[in-house]
Image: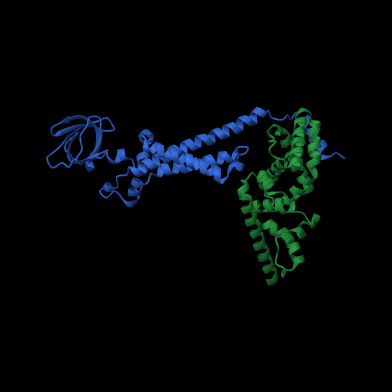
Amino acid sequence: MTTIEEKVLEEIKHRGIKPRAKWVFVAKNASLWAMFSFSLVALSIALGVTLFLATNTDFEILEDLDADIVQKTLHMVPVAWIALSLFFAVFAYANLFHTKTGYRRDTRLFKSVIAGAIAILAIGMAATDIAEKVENKAAHIPYYSATTPSKNVLWSDPENGRISGTILEIKNNQLTLEDPSGADWKVRLSPTTYDNDMQFILGERVKVVGKQKGANNFEAIEIRPW
Amino acid sequence: MIVEQDTRSKEHELVKKSLENPEYFGEIMRLFRAPLSRYIRRLAQISKDEVEHILQDSFIKLYENLNDYDPELSLSSWVYRITHNKTIDYMRSKKVHAVPVGDDEDGIFEKAVETFNIETHVDRELLQKRIRHVLDSLPEKYKSALVLRFIEEKSYSEISDILKKPPGTIATLLSRAKEAFKKEVEKQNIQHTLQ
């Protein structure tokens, strides 16, 4: 009677089965660790942008927005970035568990170190201009503004009395601003314009609350630092 | 510890030799054939031919993956892991319901009654007969954990390696599995009383 061992050895011989090369496993494991690392960096960026947006929300203008509660919530909560953070967290976890020894690293110490590193990276990105740059790049993605409380979008609404831009020129009672889309705005200042005691500096970005007067003219009621 | 290291180095040596000559792989198969057959039967209610089929598939996969063997792991845990996964895949593909064969082979059901400290007022004999059905009704993850711990008598660390789950979660998994088992035992007993 043929034993299982004999049957298996016969099949190995008959089908010419060979053990897979070691490098295949090494490469697979290395790519899983690489994906894990990439996911952590992506997660840090997503959290950094979330933090940046959360700390830069203009809560004071939310009341003035002509929007329902859902839209206002979307203006306050960076849903897309939170979703992206969750996605990368799950992706990182999945990759870790598919590595050869990842399951053994699911210890409190390991999780604390990883969480600490992510927090430091995210805070670092939000505190520097990295998160803002990423957010500005993402703003070009179609439908992005519908899911994210973009400060750029909120302050690019002249019809509702809000614009923003970089100061190109300063005259006695007029500022010339370049908005994020590259358009120039002549912003007229009046004695009643509240300027928050700002010193206007060329190249500085400001937010303006006021009224649109013609195609690219704006009358300022209040000017705030960006 | 020294014995364990010695065993590991012997296992590693056996794997290395199997890579050079498949005949040595026969030795690995001889070592694990019987325990793995039993393990497959304990996980799935399938025929002897099906057990053999899963075992053959597992051995071939084992051979193909010899270069993936991690010497930090015991050969037994690695072999059990591959067989466990093959068995679960088979059960899912065939929609096979869990649990063992016929009689109380090896007295495992008697052992389970002891292990789970089942209430003494409950009819022991009745419970022994029902343990198969109880295990059958548990979710696969609980059943696997209980079989590995209390029937295969694997350590927490071995179960962690076989199921590829973090060592810290094994105690919780087992505790939940035991709870689920006890609840099911009580439930089935109550049903019986009402009949």
Task: Tell me the colour chain A is drawn in.
Answer: blue
Where is residue B22? Give x, y as percent. Answer: 79, 31
**Left or right of B99 in this view: B170:** left
Where is residue A99? Give x, y as percent. Answer: 60, 37
Residue at 52 percent across and 35 percent down: it is A37
Residue at 81 percent across and 40 percent down: it is B30
Task: Tell me the colour chain B is drawn in.
Answer: green
Q: Is residue B117 above or below residue A72?
A: below
**Left or right of B53 in this view: A51:** left
Q: Nearer the viewer, residue B59 or A15?
A: B59
Where is residue B116? Give x, y as percent. Answer: 70, 60
Q: Nearer the viewer, residue B69 or B50?
A: B69
Where is residue B86? Give x, y as percent. Answer: 69, 43
Location of residue A159 (image quadrant):
top left
Can the viewer see residue B195?
A: no
Residue at 76 percent across and 32 percent down: it is B13
**Left or right of B138 in this view: A9:** right
Residue at 53 percent across and 43 percent down: it is A111
